[in-house]
């Protein structure tokens, strides 16, 4: 599999996953689903996250992850998958609130965003179950716990 992952930091890098780790998570999410591709993962602060969420989703405040699939010109085949934007302060806050190890939450959001770029969604219940099953399988293969385990137990 030939996947190019450009990692950009628009937030202070202290305590953030290294580019190599992010690339590992992306490649795990694409394994068996895509033979080649290029994507960008940009880690942002709350201000940039809020601005992007407002501009593209019409919602105020930052969110944990945004995915922007590449929409090419019909008839032109490019290996571009799109962009993933992850808001570092939101990830940290959610991990603490949910009692999850921060690296596991980062891995989950990178995998989640990557699956969106490869055409998966969770708008309808059936799609959500299928996407969550893929996330569980990918994360287990990386050694991380089920990110939805508390939702099932409650």
Image (cartoon, helix red, strand yellow):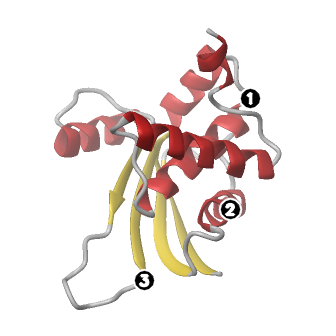
Give the Cα separation between the discs numbered 2 and 1.
19 Å
Residue that mark 2 sits on: 28
Q: Position of residue 109 (x, y in %)?
A: 55, 43
Q: Which mark is residue 79?
A: 3
Task: Please identify the quadrant where the C terminus is shown.
Answer: top right
Q: Secondary structure at mark 1?
A: loop
Alpha carbons under labels 3 and 1: distance apart: 33 Å
Query: Mark 2 touching mark 3, by CB under 8 A?
Result: no
Observer-nearest of 107 and 125: 125
- Among numbered discs 2 and 3, the one appearing first in the sequence: 2
Residue 47 rendering spot, x and y as whole percentages: 33, 36
Rendering coords of residue 9 (x, y %):
51, 54
N-term-proximal mark, 3 vs 1: 3
Is residue 111 shown above or below 149? below
Q: Tell me the quarter of the image containing the N terminus.
A: bottom right
Q: Residues within 10 Å of mark 3 (few under 14, many from 20)?
A: some
30 and 44: which one is in front?
Answer: 30
Q: Nearer the viewer, residue 11 or 65?
A: 65
Residue visible at 55% across and 23% down in the picture: 94
Res 103 → quadrant: top right
Question: Residue most toward the bottom?
Answer: 76
Residue 31 visible in the shown view: yes
Labelled disc at residue 101: 1
- Image point 62% across, 28% down: which residue? 148
């Amino acid at each position: 599999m030939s996947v190019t992952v450009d990692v950009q930091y628009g937030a202070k890098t202290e305590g953030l996953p290294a580019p190599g780790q992010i690339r590992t998570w992306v490649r795990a999410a694409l394994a068996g689903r895509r033979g080649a591709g290029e994507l960008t993962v940009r880690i942002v602060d709350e201000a940039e996250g809020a601005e992007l969420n407002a501009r593209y989703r019409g919602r105020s405040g930052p969110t944990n992850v945004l995915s922007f699939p590449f929409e090419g010109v019909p008839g032109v085949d490019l290996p571009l998958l799109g962009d993933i934007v992850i808001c570092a302060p939101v990830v940290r806050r959610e991990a603490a609130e949910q009692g999850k190890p921060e690296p596991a939450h980062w891995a989950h959001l990178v995998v989640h965003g990557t699956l969106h770029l490869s055409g998966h969604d969770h708008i309808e219940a059936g799609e959500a179950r299928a996407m969550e099953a893929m996330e569980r399988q990918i994360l287990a293969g990386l050694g991380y716990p089920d990110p939805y385990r508390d939702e099932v137990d409650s």
